[in-house]
Amino acid sequence: MKIKKINVHISEEEIEKRVRELGAEISAAYGSESVCLICILKGSAFFTCELAKRITSPVEIEFMSVSSYGAGTSSSGVVKIVQDLSTSIEGKNVLVIEDIIDSGRTLSYLLQNLKTRNPKSIRLCTLLDKPERRVVDVKVDYVGFEIPDEFVVGYGLDYNQHYRNLPYIGFVEIEE
Ligand code: IMP
Ligand code: MG
């Protein structure tokens, strides 16, 4: 697969506006209670940092890295924790931050795993959601944008580890 062109789908301004809205919604939900943001590396790094800046509740930021086995552009359902949290989440309000929910397999596995660690509450926030692609049901509490079933890059999302640094979300046009 060779990329011919990247077309802007969601602009930098639109993302920024939506991140502010989500930040306000999340702040209203937690109020003065502390919330532990779990950034799922690497894809949600940009989103987590920008979102954290818009949350007025006390925030902790933790990182976790998972890999869904399988090459190319779809996940296999076999999820491996590559880098675990460096701290306990027992008794904490946890908000998992993802870049995109596609089949739902990664998140379904991850949420089950995190629930066994006895957090006080656990919610899920994703920048992008591709509902058409869902194979496993996951309850998503906060969604930035719903997008159609097309491969996207930018604002943290990659194609073969590239394009994460684009400030917008772009649809990928493939070379014929
Ligand atoms: P799921 O387990 O199928 O929900 O896979 C989610 C993961 O697949 C995301 O965290 C991304 O790493 C990757 N992914 C799914 N769709 C896209 C896309 O359009 N662009 C870039 N990565 C994607
Ligand atoms: Mg990812």
Image: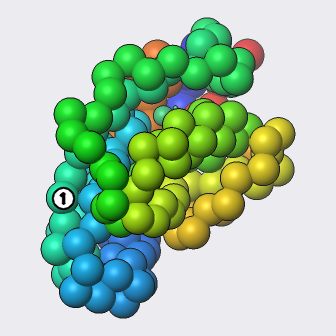
- 38 over 50 or under it: above or below: above
Which quarter of the rendered picture does the N terminus lie within?
top right
Q: How is the image coloured?
A: rainbow
- 161 over 144 or under it: above or below: above
Q: Give the residue displayed 60% in from the left and 13% down from the top.
A: 69
Q: Is residue 113 visible?
A: yes
Q: Is residue 72 visible?
A: no
* Spot occupied by residue 144 in the image (x, y as percentages of width and height): 51, 66
Count of numbered marks: 1
- Of residues 39 and 175, the one drawn nearer to the viewer in this rendering: 39
- 146 over 21 or under it: above or below: above
- Of residues 68 and 34, the one drawn nearer to the viewer in this rendering: 34
Q: Give the residue displayed 70% in from the left and 53% down from the top.
A: 138
* Spot occupied by residue 127 in the image (x, y as percentages of width and height): 48, 57
Side of 99 relative to 20 (left or right):
right
- 141 over 36 or under it: above or below: below
Q: Amino acid at mark 1?
A: Glu
Q: Give the residue displayed 52% in from the left and 48% down from the top.
A: 115
Q: Which residue is mark 1?
A: 60
> In terms of secondary structure, where does tag 1 sit?
strand
Hey, which quadrant is residue 40 in on the image? top left
Q: Give the residue displayed 22% in from the left and 86% down from the top.
A: 32
* Spot occupied by residue 58 in the image (x, y as percentages of width and height): 17, 74
- Of residues 56 and 174, the one drawn nearer to the viewer in this rendering: 56
* Spot occupied by residue 168 in the image (x, y as percentages of width and height): 39, 52
Assess mark 1: CB under 8 A from ligand 2?
Answer: no
Side of 67 relative to 57 (left or right):
right
- Of residues 29 and 128, the one drawn nearer to the viewer in this rendering: 29
Side of 130 relative to 144 (left or right):
right
10 Å neighbourhood of mark 1: few (<14), some, or many (≥20)?
Answer: few
If the picture is divided into quarters, which one holds ligand 1? Answer: top right
Which quarter of the rendered picture does the C terminus lie within?
top right
